Image: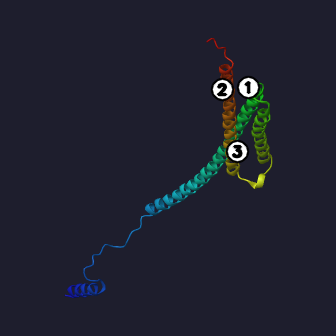
Amino acid sequence: MKTTMKTLVLAMALTFILPSRSTAQGMPVYDNTNFISLAKSLVESAKQTSQLLKTVEFLKTQKDNIEKVNNVIRQLNAIKEMASNNQILFNVVRDDLREILNSPYIKPDEVTRISDSFNDIIESSLDSMNFIEQILSSNFLKMTDAERAGILKQKEMESNEMVAEITKKTERYRDIISFRKMQDKVNNRATNY
């Protein structure tokens, strides 16, 4: 009876100590291997994040470098196009203008007007080239490469317009010469009737 009494007291004590509906599962056990692998994963993630940030910074720098190179290439292409256009202008003046002015179908009072119109185009072309030289040789108004490329592209378009204008004028004067030549043949033809 002593043992049953002790068992009964023990059972009652446990009833008061343990809450109802609880299951005794024992003491929690921590697995150190899971904690260590979690810490290693976090360290590795931090390394990868750091490497990604370095890669992003590197790519930004390379993008900036590529943009600078593209702007320089645009500038060079614009300058090359303008030099080619100037060569065309000078060739037209040297060859075609001489041919037009030496034509017997151009009147003496037209020679000055034709020469002046061609000279205006050539002077405008030379002014553009001087302006471009100033832009390229000095740090003109602290421009960025993109701004400088924009100005050069605008000057290239103006140069293309000058070539188109001088070509149109040359064609117009050739048409005038052809017309006057034909008119002269018609007016001075021999009549056999």
Horizontal side of residue 144 vs 22, given as left or right: right
> Residue 179 bears which disc, if any?
2
Q: Quadrant of residue 4?
A: bottom left
Given the image, on which type of amino acid does mark 3 rest? Lys
Vertical relation: 96 (above or below) 151:
above
Mark 3 against mark 2, which lies toward the viewer? Answer: 2
Given the image, on which type of amino acid does mark 1 rest? Tyr
Residue that sits furthest to the front in the current view: 193
Q: Residues within 10 Å of mark 1 (few under 14, many from 20)?
A: some
The tag earlier along the polypeptide, 1 or 2, is 1
Q: Quadrant of residue 26?
A: bottom left
- Write down the residue under mark 1: 105
SS at circle 2: helix
Vertical relation: 139 (above or below) 77:
below
Residue 137 position within the rendered picture, expressed as x and y whole percent measured from the top left: 80, 46
**Between marks 1 and 2, how big is the CA–CA gap?**
9 Å
Q: Residue at x 77, y 48 (%)?
A: 135
Q: Nearer the viewer, residue 24 or 190?
A: 190
Q: Residue at x 25, y 83 (%)?
A: 20
Q: Nearer the viewer, residue 69 or 59?
A: 69
What colouring style does the render use? rainbow
Residue 41 position within the rendered picture, expressed as x and y whole percent measured from the top left: 49, 58
- Write down the residue under mark 3: 155
Vertical relation: 133 (above or below) 49:
above
Q: Quadrant of the N terminus?
A: bottom left
Residue 164 position within the rendered picture, expressed as x and y whole percent measured from the top left: 66, 36
**Between marks 3 and 2, how big is the CA–CA gap?**
36 Å
**Between marks 3 and 1, how big is the CA–CA gap?**
36 Å
Given the image, on which type of amino acid does mark 2 rest? Phe
The tag earlier along the polypeptide, 3 or 2, is 3
Residue 134 position within the rendered picture, expressed as x and y whole percent measured from the top left: 80, 47
